Image (spheres, rainbow, N blue to C red):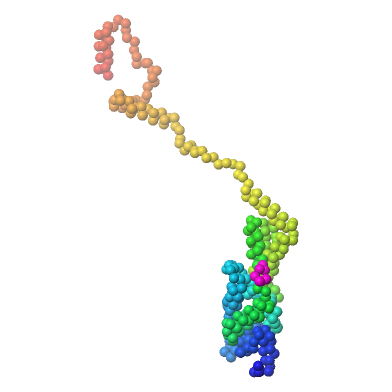
Amino acid sequence: MKLPFRKEKELYSSLYDILGFFPHDINLYKQALMHRSMARRNDKGRPVNNERLEFLGDAILDAIVGDIVFRHFEGKREGFLTSTRSKIVQRDTLNRLANEIGVSKLIVSSGHMSSHNSYMEGNAFEALVGAIYLDRGYQACMHFMQERILSHVINIDKVAYKEINFKSKLIEWCQKNKVKLRFDLVEQRRDNSNSPVFVYKAVIEGIEGGRGEGYSKKESQQAASKATLQSLRRKPQYIDAVFAAKTERTKMEEEPVVTVPDVDAKEDFIVKNEAVASVATKAVAAVEAPEARPAQRKKAEQKPEADEFDLSDIKTVPENMSKEDIIAAAEAAAFAE
């Protein structure tokens, strides 16, 4: 193949070694390898870098790797397929891929930049896939990933069964053993490049496990989880302390209550009054007595109740009075009243 420009011969040759074919539109690949730190702009003043191609390549990679994983692991469930795809297309894996196949050597970037968490190499790899898609089409991308990457650089079977989500693994272990887990922020600062740095620690049953540092909360918690899992596997005294703390906690939670609540109904809301009871009894008796006349009831209400042992009204009858005299005296006394 005759190269259009001699000065680009080295770039063409390097891309051929990586891709397995010569580019049609070299400018797409130049842009894919242009980091934003260069601050280049076109004639219209728009920035020229690989961010747009990175966006496109990310979507293409998801589709292609999903297709390959789906066909390779026949019969596997959706969760397994999703996990395997994410392991292949995650930034750490793409960074290693870019370094392994030589993409990182072709990246054009400023010398005054921090690359700690920018994943510059992995982003360039995605942008390169986006350039291939625009230059050669979907099938060329599929051929590149299947024949150049997953057949020679990545063992898809090994990566599928490799556990890399340490946080999920730690959470699963804690749930199975019914122990409490939390992640505490220890420190948040900025490094010399003014990039945020997070330090987290994993705490199980109140006992500190491992600490992790990273340029994101997720990254630092993953590192803390990995260190904690290592402690659980390699330090018997740590796992003993965790379960001792769990035993103490559950013992306190399950401690019985000594005082048993009274279930008897309380009826002390009724006030017992002897005077009220006496009046009520007499009233009922008066109503129930059929021989009680209205005049007698009225008289009883007007006069206070006499002492039943008061005999002052009883007078002695003289012995010489006849029966007729007694009756006459009684009638006179009655009419006198």
Magenta range is: 157-164
Q: Quadrant of residue 83?
A: bottom right
Q: Quadrant of the C terminus?
A: top left
Outermost residue, front direction? 74
- Is residue 191 part of the magenta span, yes or no? no
In front of the other: 101 or 228: 101
Say if 113 sits above or below 11 in the image.
Answer: above
Outermost residue, top direction? 320
Q: Where's residue 116, x and y in %?
A: 69, 76
Residue 318 can be seen in this image = yes
Q: Where's residue 186, x and y in %?
A: 68, 65
Say if 289 sits above or below 45 in the image.
Answer: above
Q: Quadrant of residue 312?
A: top left
Kindly identify the residue that appears in the image at 25 percent across and 11 percent down.
328
In front of the other: 183 or 165: 165
Q: Where's residue 164, x and y in %?
A: 67, 68
The answer to whether 316 appears left or right of 16 in the picture is left
In front of the other: 78 or 248: 78
Q: Quadrant of the N terminus?
A: bottom right
- Is residue 160 part of the magenta span, yes or no? yes
Q: Where's residue 156, x and y in %?
A: 65, 73
Residue 82 can be seen in this image = no
Kindly identify the residue that appears in the image at 30 percent across and 23 percent down.
291
